[in-house]
Each structure stands twice: as C-alpha cells, then as structure tokens.
Amino acid sequence: MKMLNLRESVSGCGCCLSRRRFLASCAACAAGAAISQPMGRKILASEAKPMRIRILYALHGPVQEVPDWPNIGFDFRPVMERIEKTLKGACPNMEFVSAMANGPEAAAKIVEEDKANPPDGYIVYQMNCWNRVVQTVADTGKPVLYLDFQFAGSGGFLVYTAAFLRQNRPNVAFVGSSNMEDHVAAVKCFEIIKSGGSVADFVAAVSKTRKDRTPAPGDMTCKPDELKCLSVEETLRQLREKKILAVGGGWGGPRFFEAIQKELGVPVISIGFEELNEAWKQADKDQAKEIAQGWKKSAAAVMDVSDETLEQSAAMYLAEKALLQRHGANAITINCLGGFYGGHIHAYPCMGFHELNNQGLIGACECDVRSTITMELITTMTQGRPGFISDPVLDTAKRQIIYAHCVASNRVFGPNGPTNPFQILTHSEDRQGAAVRSLMPEGYMTTTIELAPDRKQILFHQAKSVGNSLEDRACRTKLCGEPVGDIEKLFTQWDAWGWHRVTCYGDLKEPIFALADKLGWTVIEEA
C-alpha cells in the first residue's frame, strides 16, 4: 500500500547551529544574494529553493482495521493532518511531501520514486508498532529523523531505535516525546544540511536538542516501603518448588524452557488451548457469576463491559485455577492474543490474571515465559508482591517511562497489603472482553527486571512511581515512572531483550545483585 497524502509546500525554519556553523551559513546567504534578476532585483536567501522533506508514516492504513496499538478503528488521518499543519507553520522554508507505507515493499517503492526528485531528508513516524519502514529509508543514506507516535508505534520505535544505536547508524536521529514542540525542534535541525553541514552534524544536533529539552531529574525521594525479601538461598530453594504452565505456545520454545529448569530449577509445562477451553466450558456458572459480581462491586468503574462478558472472564479465571491445581503449578501464561483472535479461546484471561496476581500466584500475558519466570522470582523473593508485565513507552518530554498493559494487580504490596483503585474496561487493542486499569500508588520506588537464563543475564532498572496515564490509546493500565539514572541509556536494550519488562514495587537492587552473584550471572543496568 502506498498513498501520497496532503502534499504541502512551505518555506523555511530556524536551525540548531553552532556559532561557527551560523557564520558559515551567513556567508552562503551572501553568496546566494549575488544572483540577479531583471530590473536589477536580487534573489534573497529567503527566496531560495526550499528544502524538500519526505514524511513517511509507518502504519497499517489511514483507519486501523485490525486489533493492534493504538486500537482497532483508530483514525490516523486527523493526526497526520495536525502533524503536517504544525510543521508547515513552524518551518516555512521547508516543503513537506507525505506518504504512507505499511512495510518494506511499500517503503522501497516510495524511495525509488523519490529518485526522480530526491528529498533533502526523511521524517519517519512510527504510527503502528511493527511496520518495518524506517529500515528501508535509513538505507538511502539520507538524513533520517525517526519519531514515535506514542501509545501507537512505541514498541517498534524502541526496538528499531535500539538496533540503529547498536549498529551505529550514522544517518538516523530519533525523538521519543509526547510534546510536538520537541518534534518541531528536531525537524528544524534539517536546516544544518542546507547550511552546508554534514549528516553527522544533523544527527548530533537532534541528539543535543533531545537531551537539552528533556527535563532535569525531579525529587527522587520516595515514600517509606518496608519490603522484607527472602535471602538468596531461600529464594532459590522456594523457586525450585514452582512450576509454570505455558498455554498455546511460548516465547523461546523448548530450548529456553530447558534453560529455565537448568539454571533455576523451574519446569515449564506446555499445554494446548484445548485443555484450557474445556476447563472454561466446565467452569461452574453460578460461581463465575458470583466472582463477576464481586469484581463489579470492587471496581471503581465498569466501562463498556457487559455482565455476560464479565461472567465469561470469571469462568476463564476458574479454568486457570483448575489447570494450576491439575498440574501442581503456581504460574500460568497464555497466548491470549493468538488464542482469542484465532477463536481457540472465547474469553480474555486478563481478569483471571488480575485475580491470581492479587493472591500471590502468577498470571502472565502472551505466553511470555521469560517474563513469567521473572514474575516467579519477584513474587518468591518479595514474599508475595506481584510483578507487573508491561509494554513500556519512553517519553523524554516528561522524563518518564510508562509501563502499559491490560493486566495488573491492585495489591502492589502483596496479598495482605492495601488495595488501590481499579477499573474494568475492554481489552484495548480490539475493544472486546474485560481487562483492568489499575491506578497504582504514586511516590514509591519500583524495580524493573527481565531474566534471561539462557544468557545468564538480568536486565535491571528502577523508577519512582509518579502517576497513572489515562490516555485512551494502547493498553489500559499505564503506570508512569521517573527513571533512576540516565533516560538516554534506556533507549539502548530493546532490540536485545524485546519489549516486555516486569515491574515490582520496592527497592530490589541489593537482592537482585546478590542473586546474580550467587548464580554467576551478569546484571545489565539499562539506565
């Protein structure tokens, strides 16, 4: 699919120039003014040919027809119009020509057509997560500004940006910000090319602009939290008594499952959708209705979710419990999206996972076994605190990392701790089923990790919880945190580790590092 869209001609914008570059550009302007027209009139620098910038939107289509971030039915057209209107007003010496591409073939076709009238640079907006467009554009060697439409394209933006950083791509600059003014400031850096600067100068200018516009760290003082962790030895002993059920396939496959058992002593048992679906059918309907009514009564709000849907979700929770009991396991992770979209299961497991995690058991999304073993470790080490598996978003405008998913506990301090408010809404991507928005407490230290038993590594960062985003795009629960350390460094690991992270309330730095020492593993501090 390739659609040219909203061609707009504009002229000029300021630039991010050093004093030396500014003087060089003035000399170039003086030279340009020497060209004469009839009647003795000279062409002014402001009348020179504008820079031509191609905007490429990486997305499925102008109106989203499939379940994905930001959500099914999302209309991107007003968003694209606002972007182009803003850039036109801010950069009147640039001509913007825009197009949409859903993948590398469409992007290659546009790049090939651009050879007839080459642009001076490219802007690529990641509008959906995994459309591979920016890679094709980066291969042109032209200066590329890569931008995230947040809570929509953020997964691909983080993974692809980390890959560019690892590859030391010399022509790709990036900005991940919720503030359009940050995008504009980065676009203005294209003027460096017009003033005789190199592509490397452009990339360096965007990097400096991004860092300069990121707020300084706030007050990182956290509220008291008396977390008592088990010793490393006792954590490992109890961990060896655990078992994970992986339903409908799992990330990593048998070799990864073997690494978990070899390194940590936790077996992973693969079962099919059929067993789960049969348990769902056999669930006691009266008991499911009672559980559903309890959820409805406890929730701060129930939005667009019928009683029938809630009862089906409660039956799924009973099915999850039945499978855990049957197999002697304490953790279950389900290929929920593949199962629901493929018609293999008929209720989302989100509410069931919410309930399990509130009880000190483990319910984990998307059959992500690595995150599941991470949750196992956290809950064991902290004597019951749940891990929150998420798809994070990085926002330099607020100096925040936002942990987003449609499943979360509302007992972040453990089964016997206080509750926080939660709401029941549809699963965000397809607006179906029942899911949770947990409004988690502010002001506490959190620890985020991922285990990689196959590599003997632990990924680690910390953040202070500072709020909850109610943005309608993307997953329902969105815990906002201010990272401890360097937010710039947080852009670097996503290609090696994937998008998911697991977050727990509490300062787990000392016990996690002690665990790594005991196991002979390496801790990678991503901030």
Image (cartoon, rainbow, N blue to C red):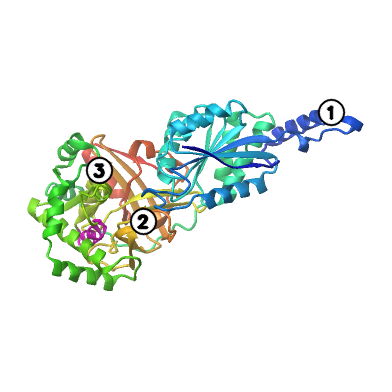
Q: Which mark is residue 370?
A: 3
- Classify residue 490 by image quadrant: top left
Q: Is residue 310 above or below residue 457?
A: below
Which residue corresponds to the image point at 52% horizontal and 31% vertical from the top-left?
110
Res. 235 visible in picture:
yes
Q: Which mark is residue 326?
A: none
| CB atoms of marks 3 and 1 within 8 Å | no
> 67 left or right of 117?
left
| CB atoms of marks 1 and 2 within 8 Å | no
Q: CA distance from mark 2 to mark 3?
A: 23 Å
Give the secondary structure at mark 3: helix
Measured as percent of width and height from the top left, residue 131 is found at 42, 39
Measured as percent of width and height from the top left, residue 361 is found at 19, 57
Give the residue at the far bottom of this rendering.
297
Q: Which residue is mark 2?
A: 428
Q: Which residue is mark 1?
A: 34
Task: Tell me which segment is drawn in magenta.
Answer: 348-360
Crowding around mark 3 (Cα neighbors within 10 Å: few <14, some 14 to 19, many 20+) is: many
